[in-house]
């Protein structure tokens, strides 16, 4: 399992192979400032970590959306400098949602290359249950924007049932939010020309997705903060309670 504290161990050749690009491309992005510098180890060899790989995957997704190099530079400059590999994977998922569904059919070897690791049968079944991949004979239909997050999920120390229940909760609430927002925007543009409506929809899609992600992240942080603080508060309350045993 990859962790955020994992030491950079990939050489530039290994990083390029994992990301599906050339070494020349990695060095070009580094020269343009799109990739942070590697950690220099013994013998002056640069080593790269999960953050570098996640950033390359984000750049690839931005290119898939038709963004120019200048546009990618502007996009990356707007991101916080302390984003983890998981944060970058979330950004990539958001970017991938801007376009229509882009499911690809790949071999198992290519699927594992994209995942960055070998996948056993149990892990493949979990990814299928999560809706990340769909098996079709010797091919796998997969959503590139969800694959990395799906691989991270199968390493989470929760039961399969808990992960599926969480997926159900997210699906139900996201559909409810999408339905409510759709009605809101539909009522707001009811009198406009259909061409203007389609243009507005294309413009609003990435903005709404980003707003939903930001709102959810903030809400989740607040919930986790309250949940983690509750045991400490309960312990403090227990200490403050008067001892009634001798009364």
Image (tube, rainbow, N blue to C red):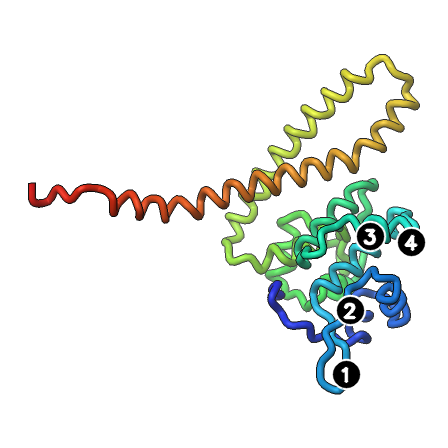
Crowding at label 3, few (<14), some or many (≥20) Cα neighbours within 10 Å? many
* Residue drawn at point x = 78 percent, y = 70 percent: 15
Residue for badge 1: 44
Mark 1 to mark 3 CA distance (whole Å): 31 Å
Q: Nearer the viewer, mark 1 or mark 4?
A: 1
Alpha carbons under labels 2 and 4: distance apart: 19 Å
Label at residue 23: none
Nearer the N terminus, badge 1 or badge 4?
1
**Label placed on residue 37:** 2
Q: Which residue is mark 4?
A: 69
The residue that appears at 76% across and 66% down in the rendered structure is: 113
Image coords of residue 112 (percent x, y): 73, 65
Report, in whole angstroms, how far the alpha carbon at label 3 lies from the one at label 4.
Answer: 12 Å
Q: Are marks 2 and 3 in contact (CB under 8 Å)?
A: no
Per the image, the residue denoted by label 3 is 61
Residue count near mark 1 (Cα–Cα under 10 Å), binned few <14, some 14–19, many ≥20: few
Residue closest to the far left: 247
Residue for point 80% across, 48% down? 103
Instruction: Answer above or below: position of 95 versus 82.
Output: above
Vertical order, 177 against 141 (above or below): above
Task: Report, in whole angstroms, how far the alpha carbon at label 2 lies from the one at label 3.
Answer: 21 Å
| Residue 108 visible in the snapshot | no
The answer to whether 26 is drawn above or below residue 71 in the figure is below
Q: Secondary structure at mark 1?
A: helix
Answer with the quarter of the image where residue 233 lies: top left
Please tell me whether mark 1 or mark 3 is closer to you in this view: 1
| Of the image marks 2 and 4, the number of the one nearer the N terminus | 2
Q: Are marks 3 and 4 in contact (CB under 8 Å)?
A: no
Real-space Cα separation, disc 1 to disc 4, in angstroms: 30 Å
Disc 2 versus disc 1: distance between alpha carbons?
13 Å
Whichever of labels 3 and 4 marks the residue nearer the N terminus, that label is: 3
Q: Looking at the image, do the residues carrying marks 2 and 1 touch, with CB atoms under 8 Å apart?
A: no
């Amino acid at each position: 399992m990859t962790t955020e504290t994992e030491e950079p161990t990939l050489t530039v050749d290994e990083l390029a192979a994992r990301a599906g690009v050339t070494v020349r491309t990695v060095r070009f992005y580094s020269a343009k400032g799109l990739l942070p510098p590697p950690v220099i180890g013994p013998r002056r060899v640069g080593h790269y970590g999960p953050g570098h790989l996640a950033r390359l995957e984000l750049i690839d997704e931005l290119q898939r959306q038709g963004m120019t190099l200048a546009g990618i530079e502007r996009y990356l400059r707007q991101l916080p400098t302390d984003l983890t590999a998981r944060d970058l994977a979330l950004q990539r998922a958001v970017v991938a949602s801007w376009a229509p569904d882009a499911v690809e059919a790949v071999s198992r070897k290519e699927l594992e290359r994209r995942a960055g690791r070998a996948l056993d049968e149990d892990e493949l079944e979990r990814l299928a249950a999560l809706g990340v991949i769909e098996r079709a004979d010797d091919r796998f239909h997969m959503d590139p924007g969800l694959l990395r997050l799906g691989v991270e999920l199968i390493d989470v120390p929760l039961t399969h049932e808990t992960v599926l229940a969480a997926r159900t909760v997210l699906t139900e609430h996201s559909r409810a939010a999408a339905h409510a927002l759709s009605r809101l925007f539909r009522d707001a543009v009811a009198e406009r020309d259909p061409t203007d409506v389609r243009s507005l929809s294309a413009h609003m899609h990435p903005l709404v997705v980003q707003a939903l992600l930001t709102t959810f992240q903030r809400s989740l942080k607040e919930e986790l903060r309250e949940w983690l603080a509750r045991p400490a508060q309960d312990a403090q309350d227990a200490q403050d309670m008067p001892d009634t045993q001798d009364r």
